[in-house]
Amino acid sequence: MNYVDTDVRCQTGSVRQAENKHPWMLIVPPPSVHDRDVPPVGAQSDAVSAAPIDRAHLAKFTFGDPELEAEVVGLFATQVVALCRDLRTCRDNSGWAFLTHSLKGSARAVGAWRMAELATVLEANSFADPTNTALLDDVEQLLQDAAQHMQFDPGPPPFGASA
């Protein structure tokens, strides 16, 4: 293996030359979003899109460990609650873009494809779009559906959710 001038795949998918100043250290590129089997929006099978979380996708990244899976899903639920709360109070487009992009990435990471699709729509909206409230209600409902599907307790309904 050549330790100098190793091709490294960047997160953008481009390849750059990396010079390793330490010959004893192997350059390992970070895992890239492009290396994951993330189906494009709208391309999921009916069986996958029917489930709130794609368990097969999640199992690939948790090595089939049910405890790790539960921990990852719990962290995901906590983050979704916080993001929805912050999105409901967001009053600028740059903050809105950051929060919706975070929601989309988190949903894709655990295989919550329908939530990722909603986040994609939210990301394209401005913070003042009148449809955002209904879309956020849908995201929060999907979190509740995921809780039932994965058999975990996400806690009380998120801030501003309709019960």
Image (tube, rainbow, N blue to C red):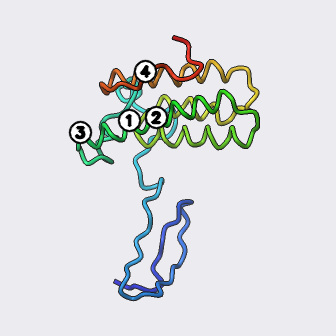
Pointer 4: what residue?
Answer: 144
User: On screen, 58 above or below 16?
Assistant: above
Q: Which comes before the other along the chain, label 1 or label 4? A: 1
Work out whether residue 39 or residue 32 is closer to the camera in this orientation and state it.
32
At label 1, which amino acid type do we have?
A: Gly
- State which mark lies toward you, 4 or 2: 2
Q: Residue at x 51, y 30 (%)?
A: 81
35 on left or right of 57: right
| Of labels 1 and 3, the one closer to you | 1
Q: Are marks 1 and 4 in contact (CB under 8 Å)?
A: no
Mark 2 = which residue? 78
The amino acid type of the residue labelled 3 equals Pro
The location of residue 142, given as percent across then percent down, is 46, 23
Q: CA distance from mark 4 to mark 2?
A: 12 Å
Tag of residue 74: 1
> Reading the chain from its start, which is encountered first: label 1 or label 3?
3
Q: Amino acid at mark 4?
A: Gln
Is residue 143 depicted above or below 104 in this figure? above
Return the x and y of residue 74 as percentages of the image width and height: 38, 35
What is the C-alpha distance between the residues marked 1 and 2? 6 Å
Q: Residues within 10 Å of mark 4 (few under 14, many from 20)?
A: many
Q: Are marks 1 and 2 in contact (CB under 8 Å)?
A: yes
- The residue singled out by tag 3 in the image is 66
Whole-percent x, y for residue 20 in the image:
46, 84
